[in-house]
């Protein structure tokens, strides 16, 4: 006759015999990822760079541009500083007349 205490203990230690992947808390298989949590990194393309520059030239805010291309505001500012007019190239262009050519 099976021991009731042992049968109850086995309810809490269920292990499937054949599991291709580890299981999550809901018993679903966890698919292998790249080994890092989070979303994939945003990679700017020439088309998105041109679109950001175009939207900024139209006078849209940084938040509106971020919503338009589907990224967060910090991601937009990180990946498109030149197109937004906040890059070091733009700053140098504006500061050049003030420095009298470096002399």
Image (tube, rainbow, N blue to C red):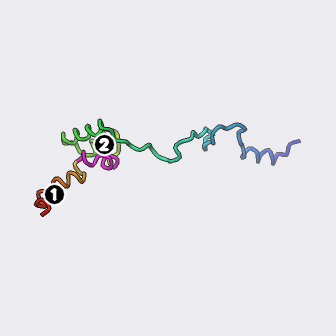
Task: Give residue 65's quadrant in the image.
Answer: top left
Q: Residue at x 32, y 47 (%)?
A: 79
Question: Which quarter of the rendered picture does the N terminus lie within?
Answer: top right
Q: Nearer the viewer, mark 2 or mark 1?
A: 1
Left of 48 or right of it: where is 42? right
Left of 11 or right of it: where is 62? left
- Element type at marker 2? helix
- Pinpoint residue 44: horizontal percent, then vertical percent: 34, 41
Looking at the image, tell me whether mark 2 or mark 1 is earlier in sequence order: 2
Q: Which mark is residue 66?
A: 2
Magenta part, dominant SS: helix
Q: Which residues are magenta?
A: 74-84
Check if residue 75 falls in the magenta segment: yes
Left of 37 or right of it: where is 19? right
Front-most of residues 10 and 73:
73
Give the class, few, some or many, for how many residues have Cα within 10 Å of label 1's Cα (few <14, many ≥20).
few
Q: Which residue is mark 1?
A: 95
């Amino acid at each position: 006759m099976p021991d009731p205490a042992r049968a109850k203990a086995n309810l809490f230690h269920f292990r499937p015999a054949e599991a291709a992947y580890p299981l999550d808390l809901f018993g679903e298989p966890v698919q292998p990822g790249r080994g890092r949590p989070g979303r994939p990194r945003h990679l700017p393309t020439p088309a998105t760079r041109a679109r950001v520059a175009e939207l900024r030239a139209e006078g849209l805010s940084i938040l509106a541009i971020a919503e338009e291309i589907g990224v967060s505001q910090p991601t937009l500012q990180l990946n498109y500083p030149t197109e937004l007019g906040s890059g070091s190239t733009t700053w140098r262009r504006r500061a050049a007349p003030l420095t009298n050519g470096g002399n």
